């Protein structure tokens, strides 16, 4: 359907006339201003909600972020204290050689040197590796 056909169909429609007093009712409502007041009230409430949301949501997120940072700081301090305790109980001269689920093998190079064995020559049950 093109524009000309549509125009022809619109012209073929019967004319519609307003009921008696329609114009007077519209003019009276316009003079009283009843319609836009309700709309203004709804717009004012909606704008207030948007403004509150714009300020509250970032504040809540910032508070959550600060709480998470405080929890992480406490966890880092606890881990640092635990690491310090572990390091205090470990002899730094010991060397971890290996092991499995049941045994860990550590060597104290100072004791090897005291026993007259060269520190750089590993052996296993008297055999050179």
Image: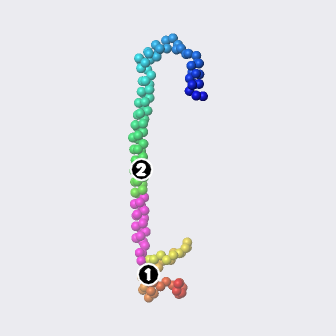
Q: Nearer the viewer, mark 2 or mark 1?
A: 2
Check disc 2 and report its element: helix, strand or loop. helix
Q: Residue at x 42, y 82 (%)?
A: 110
The boundaries of the magenta stretch are: 75-93
- Judging depth in this view, the residue of 76 and 17 nearest the camera is 17
Decide whether the magenta segment is chiefly helix, strand or loop: helix
- Callout 1: SS: helix
The colour mode here is rainbow
Q: Position of residue 84 (x, y in %)?
A: 40, 67
Crowding around mark 2 (Cα neighbors within 10 Å: few <14, some 14 to 19, many 20+) is few
| x, y percent for residue 11 | 56, 19
User: Which part of the image, by quadrant, shows the N terminus?
Assistant: top right
Q: Residue furthest top?
A: 20
Relative to 63, residue 77 above or below = below
Q: In percent of the image, x 58 and y 28: which residue is there?
A: 2
Mark sitting earlier along the chain (2/1): 2
Q: Are the two marked residues, 2 and 1, in contact with CB atoms closer than 8 angstroms? A: no
Q: Residues within 10 Å of mark 1 (few under 14, many from 20)?
A: some
The residue lying toward the viewer, choosing from 33 and 42, is 33
**Residue occupying image coordinates x 55% and y 72%:** 101
Label ID, residue 65: 2
Q: Is residue 60 above or below residue 43?
A: below
Question: Where in the figure is residue 54, as x and y percent of width and height?
Answer: 41, 40
Real-space Cα separation, disc 2 to disc 1, in angstroms: 49 Å
Please determine whether, in this image, residue 11 is positioned above or below residue 106: above
Q: Which mark is residue 109?
A: 1
């Amino acid at each position: 359907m093109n524009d000309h056909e549509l125009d022809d169909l619109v012209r073929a429609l019967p004319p519609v006339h307003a009921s008696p007093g329609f114009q007077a009712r519209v003019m009276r409502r316009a003079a009283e201003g009843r319609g836009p007041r309700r709309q203004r009230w709804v717009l004012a409430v909606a704008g207030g909600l948007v403004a509150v949301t714009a300020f509250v949501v970032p504040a809540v997120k910032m508070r959550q972020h600060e709480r998470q940072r405080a929890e992480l700081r406490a966890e880092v301090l606890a881990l640092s204290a635990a690491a310090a305790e572990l390091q205090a109980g470990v002899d730094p001269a010991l060397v971890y050689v290996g092991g499995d689920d049941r045994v860990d093998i550590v060597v104290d190079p100072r004791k090897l040197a005291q026993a007259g064995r060269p520190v750089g020559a590993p052996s296993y049950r008297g055999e050179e590796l």
